[in-house]
Amino acid sequence: MPQKRLSVVVTRRLPEAVETRLTELFDVTLRDDDTPMTRAELASAMSGADVLVPTVTDQIDAGLIGQAGERLKLIANYGAGIDHIDVETARRRGILVANTPGVMTDDTADMVMALMLAVTRRMQEGLAVMQRGEWEGWAPTAFLGSRLGGKRLGILGMGRIGQAVAKRAHAFGMQIHYHNRRRLRPETEDALEATWWESLDQMVARMDVISVNCPHTPSTFHLLNARRLKLLKPTAVIVNTSRGEVIDESALTRMLKAGEIAGAGLDVYQHGIKGNPELVNMANVVMLPHMGSATMEGRIEMGEKVLLNVKTFADGHRPPDQVVPSMQ
């Protein structure tokens, strides 16, 4: 029996290889440009499609899901994070939600190390001097940063990405510490040479670098709030490639301006694309436009995960990366 041709709407432009494969198998509506859909466009897409393929820029909330057409049965997210989708409301409507875990692990962990190095070695300041044509030559005391070797790294969230960061940081000679909802198995801890801290407060107060690698959930919103940020050493650095909502960005900004925290490397922001204009011109802050997973290899692998989830669903089976609401 030939495979059912599902109606699939893709909300953003994906790598050409991914779009081509999707259109070979399904009746696909592709986005004409690479701008996020408006709420009205999302509502229209969800009214007549069998499958929606959104990205992190699409807020699929209870209101939109409530208006969705009866045909919509799968939201196959292009990305691992699902905090922009109301999974519980989707479940009540009988709509499955799937994501693309695992494929962004190495790319994101690489970006953590890049940001860590950029901040601690003051690369942004050096780049700015070169771009302005102000470099007057080498000097013994110019652009003095700090080395990573021997420093304490505190990883907040020891899932796939957190563990990948630990392996990379260990190669730099860093001491690995972590706080996680659940302690790792002893053999995993031993392999990573990682020390578990039950108390986040105690860990934060003793680290030289904090890497935020936990997802955004109701329990992790502002997990690094003003009180916890004040526990950091004034020489400490924060790197966030997870979700901006995990850090109280206003408090972080105040402390960076006051010199109470040495620096920050940020790839995500509490207010999304608007970012934080106060942070932009700080010499001790490196800001990137959410490009932690931005490799061609990774984005194609994400698309392959989406394709497998949709194809498996079309064949009448549960998508391999179906999200369970209670696990959020």
Image (cartoon, rainbow, N blue to C red):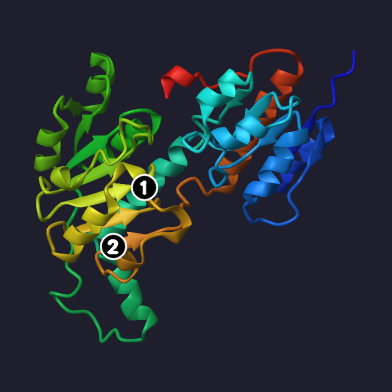
- Kindly tell me whether residue 151 is visible in this rendering: no
| Closer to viewer: mark 1 or mark 2 | 1
Residue type (three-letter) at the residue carrying disc 1: Gly
Judge from the rendering whether residue 300 lies leftward or rightward of residue 189; answer left or right.
right
Judging from the image, what secondary structure is the residue with disc 2 in? Answer: strand
Coordinates of residue 48 in the picture (x, y in percent): 78, 34
Which residue: 64% across, 14% down? Answer: 318
Quarter of the image with the C terminus is top left
Which residue: 26% across, 15% down? Answer: 187
Quarter of the image with the N terminus is top right
Judge from the rendering whether residue 248 lies leftward or rightward of residue 226; answer left or right.
right
Q: Nearer the viewer, residue 182 or 87?
A: 87
Which residue: 41% across, 53% down? Answer: 271
Which residue: 9% across, 34% down? Answer: 202
Q: Residue 175's image quarter? A: top left
Q: Residue 245's image quarter? A: top left
Judging from the image, what secondary structure is the residue with disc 1 in? Answer: helix
On screen, residue 226 above or below 142? above
Q: Nearer the viewer, residue 110 or 251?
A: 251
**Residue placed under numbered mark 1 in the picture:** 244
Q: Nearer the viewer, residue 172 or 235?
A: 235
Instruction: State the CA–CA distance, disc 1 to disc 2.
Output: 15 Å
Labels 1 & 2 near each other (Cβ < 8 A):
no
Coordinates of residue 142 in the picture (x, y in percent): 18, 75
Q: Nearer the viewer, residue 257 or 89?
A: 89
Q: Earlier in the sequence, mark 1 or mark 2?
A: 1
Coordinates of residue 252 in the picture (x, y in percent): 23, 54
Residue type (three-letter) at the residue carrying disc 2: Val
- Would you call the spot at circle 2 few (<14 residues within 10 Å), some (14-19), or many (20 or more)? many
**Residue placed under numbered mark 2 in the picture:** 285
- Kindly tell me whether residue 100 is visible in this rendering: yes
